[in-house]
Image (tube, grey):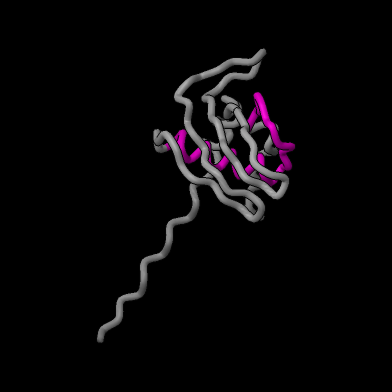
Amino acid sequence: MAEQSPPYWVLISVLFSSQPLTPALAMTLHQAAYDLYRRGDSEQPVAGDLLTGRVRNLRKDVQMGTLAGPAFEAEIETERGSGTVRFLLTRQGLELMKEQPAEPPVPPRPRYLN
């Protein structure tokens, strides 16, 4: 049985959202932000079944109460219209993501004799 991803509320903390966030939307934003964080990039497009937009790495660590982590902002278009989401990746979530096994490597293509 494959390991499941931690729940979105452990991985991401929303600071502001002009759109209601579904669990699927939160996980899509988390994945885009986590990719930016790992690579050190500043911006990337994000897309899903009901979402398009851009996620930006604000390159700041923020703290709200006991939650702390790197901050991100997303400009999104959903079936409900356009909106802005400001959020952080939680330190607990970052640690949990590091512990997850990497995706299995892609097997090499077979070599043919002809």
Side of 108 relative to 23 (left or right) = left
Residue at 36 percent of width and 66 percent of height: 108
Q: Is residue 79 above or below residue 15?
A: below
Single out the residue that lies furthest toward the front.
Answer: 81
Horizontal and vertical percent position of residue 65? 67, 13
Q: Nearer the viewer, residue 38 or 104?
A: 38
**Quadrant housing residue 84:** top right
Q: Nearer the viewer, residue 24 or 80?
A: 80
Q: Nearer the viewer, residue 52 or 65?
A: 52
Side of 11 relative to 43 (left or right) = right
Single out the residue that lies furthest toward the top.
Answer: 65
Horizontal and vertical percent position of residue 85? 62, 32
Horizontal and vertical percent position of residue 23? 72, 42
Horizontal and vertical percent position of residue 106? 43, 61
The magenta-colored residue range is: 12-38
Residue at 48 percent of width and 20 percent of height: 60
Does the magenta run of residues contain 15?
Answer: yes
